[in-house]
Amino acid sequence: MKKIKLIFFLFLSFAVQAQEKIAVTAADYSNSEVEMADVMRSEGKIYVLVGIIVLIFIGLLAYLIQTDRRLARLEKNKAN
């Protein structure tokens, strides 16, 4: 039964599209403005976004350091 569900959801995921495809024109390549970033910067929300990204990276770094310490402790105990 699990395999049938897995196959069903696999084929279902092929049929689902997140967004419709829009043709890319030559004007799109010459556009150097990023409207979303400009709006977020003007409203001060860009700093919130940067803060959240920094917090995520700090969390990942802390997790990696903690895992490294645990692994080193296990290796040290294994050697004794």
Image: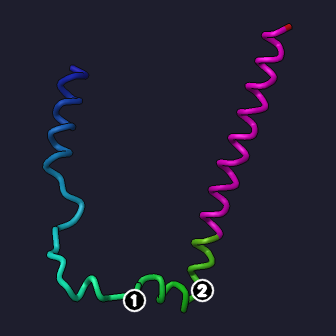
- Would you say residue 44 sits in the magenta stretch? no
Q: State left or right for residue 76 relative to residue 46.
A: right
Q: Residue at the spot x=71%, y=33% of the render?
A: 67
- The kind of residue tagged 1 is Glu
Q: Provide residue 65's location: percent of width, then percent of height.
A: 74, 40
Disc number at residue 66?
Answer: none
Quadrant housing residue 58: bottom right
Q: Provide residue 80's location: percent of width, then percent of height.
A: 86, 7
The magenta-colored residue range is: 51-79
Disc number at residue 33?
Answer: 1
- The kind of residue tagged 2 is Gly
Comparing 69 with 17, the one in front is 69
Kind of element beneath mark 1? loop
For label 2, the residue is 44
Position of residue 14 relative to residue 49, above or below, is: above
Comparing 5 with 78, the one in front is 78
